[in-house]
Image (spheres, helix red, strand yellow):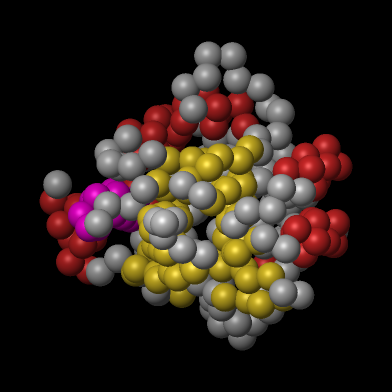
Amino acid sequence: MRTEVEFSIVHLSDAHLFADPTQEVYGTKPSLNLKAAVHCINAIRPRPSLCVYTGDAVSEECETAYVRFKEQMQYLSIPVHYAVGNHDDRKSLRRYLLDESMPTDDPYYYCFQQSEWRMVVLDTAKPGKIWGSIGEEQLEWLDRLLQKCEPTLVFMHHHAVSVGVSWLDEVMLKNPGPLLSILQRAGCIKAILFGHIHFECHIQHAGLHFMSVPSLSFQLGEVNWAEKSVSLPPGFRLITIKGDEVRSVVHRLTDYELAISEKR
């Protein structure tokens, strides 16, 4: 008799840490937000199996910012898998977050198994640009990988479909057509999860389901007529897998959770 698989994944993104832990941006303290999120996640029961962080660990490219981010993430009681964001530097990510002694700036994409599920982490970063791109070599790798049909979640930094906010859609994944074609053709993609836009959304497009996650830093307006930054709390997404079903919920950090973390 086959046992029904059940596990959960934490999706985090866009902490945008600075070298100075007291630095504020749009009225929020990124370092405090990340600290509060880590404590909150560690209290979840049953404990999640893993965390996927979809990019933009830091806001300024310096060793101190990456070290502060790594120090915070080391308190997480579950394994963490990283994707590259537009604010990240691949060499720094490999050196400080992956502990590689001879880091390269090659694209960082990979897959791993969790129970009977496949997790795919893509690299959509274009060095020096806010918008994203995916090279031919990565697309060919993905196409070959997905020829084996098994339930799959895809994680990436940039959005591959329009979110309806004009200035954000200008910095989405460029030429997403080839990627979308591969994902549609595979027929086994349960969801595509991303960061970058600093707000939560669910989008159905051409038979694919896309989900974003709130930022761990400042939040952005979800419509064209909103202010660029809005006063919503930071948050994370908890994804629950049961059998072949995917469910998820976003947790926004409460004032109490932020206040407790500030005192720790």
Res 4 quadrant in image:
bottom left
* Left/right of residue 67 with respect to residue 180 in the rendered view: left
Residue 232 in percent (x, y) is at 39, 74
At which x and y percent is residue 116?
A: 51, 49
Q: Which residues are magenta?
A: 32-45
Q: Count the marks.
A: 0
Of residues 73 and 220, the one drawn nearer to the viewer in this rendering: 73
Q: Residue at x 54, y 32 (%)?
A: 93
Q: Residue at x 57, y 48 (%)?
A: 119
The answer to which of 202 and 143 lies nearer the viewer is 143
Answer left or right for 128 relative to 219.
Answer: right
The residue furthest bottom is 225
Above or below residue 47? Residue 243 is below
Q: Is residue 234 above or below residue 62?
A: below
Residue 238 image-quadrant placement? bottom left
Tell me which secondary structure the magenta stretch mostly adopts. Answer: helix
Instruction: Identify the residue at image location x=72%, y=39%.
Output: 127
Q: Is residue 192 above or below residue 17?
A: below
Q: Does residue 225 appear in this view?
A: yes
Task: Please provide percent x and percent y for residue 171.
Answer: 72, 60
Q: Is residue 199 visible?
A: no
Q: Residue furthest top?
A: 101
Could you tell me which quadrant the N terminus lies in? Answer: bottom left
Q: Is residue 182 left or right of residue 94?
A: right
Q: Let me know if residue 247 is in the magenta part.
A: no
Nearest the eye: 85 or 228 = 85
The residue depicted at 36 percent of the width and 48 percent of the height is 49
In terms of depth relative to the viewer, which is nearer, 224 or 162? 162
Give how far across and how far down residue 132 sits, in percent: 73, 52
